[in-house]
Image (cartoon, rainbow, N blue to C red):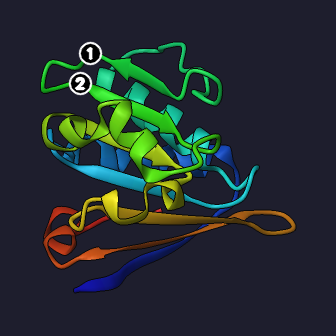
Amino acid sequence: MVHTLFAFYLADEKATAALATQIAPRLKAGDTLLLEGEIGAGKSAFARALIRARLGRMEDVPSPTFTLVQTYEDDHGDIWHCDLYRLTHPDEALELGLDEAFETAICLIEWPDRLGEVAPKTALTLSFEAQDDHHHVAITGPNVWAEKLRGLDA
């Protein structure tokens, strides 16, 4: 069963990065974050900050808009950053190898609606929304995430 776990007001990109930095060490191989929201809502900024926090270094993290998938080697398992905007059918996600990545990597999926029924049932969903002078994110997921994210603040 999916529950709303948190909702945060993010004043700027620095606040988005702070949230990503808190979530990053709580992830393990097999975890999937579904990043929802319109263009400019903060999905890529969040993913970039999370990847840098996981890797522990400043890393060039380009948007995977055209490549569809960017992978990063982490000591505890690969990180897959995916932008599925250009996909037209969930089978195309499987052709990218996402079904295996969902089990063996940390997956950050932008435009997760393109996955359809392929989306992991255990995924954490972050729904980003751009407001006039800030962003908002609602975090929902199965109960298992409540314990993993205990103490999260932004």
**Residue 106 at x, y percent in the picture:** 26, 38
**Residue 151 at x, y percent in the picture:** 26, 67
Please indicate whether residue 127 sits to the left or right of residue 106 in the image.
right
How crowded pointer 1 is (Cα within 10 Å; few <14, some 14-19, many 20+) is rated as few
Vertical placement of residue 141 versus 52, above or below: below
Secondary structure under badge 1? loop
Q: Residue at x 29, y 31 (%)?
A: 97
Residue 73 visible to an observer of this rendering: yes
- Kindly indicate whether the residue at mark 1 contacts the one at mark 2 (C-beta within 8 angstroms): yes
Residue 128, quarter of the rendered image: bottom right
Residue at the spot of label 2: 78
- State the residue in front, 110 or 16: 110
- State the residue in front, 131 or 30: 30
- State the residue in front, 134 or 109: 109
Secondary structure under badge 2? loop
Q: Residue at x 23, y 24 (%)?
A: 78
Give the quadrant of the N terminus: bottom left
Q: Residue at x 21, y 65 (%)?
A: 122
Vertical placement of residue 89 versus 21, above or below: below
Measure the C-alpha gap from mark 2 to mark 1.
5 Å
Q: Amino acid at mark 2?
A: Asp
Residue 153 visible to an observer of this rendering: no
Q: Residue at x 24, y 68 (%)?
A: 121
Residue at the spot of label 1: 73
Please indicate whether residue 20 sits to the left or right of residue 78 in the image.
right
Q: Earlier in the sequence, mark 2 or mark 1?
A: 1
Q: Amino acid at mark 1?
A: Glu
Q: What mark, if any, has residue 22 been given in the picture?
A: none
**Residue 13 at x, y percent in the picture:** 66, 45
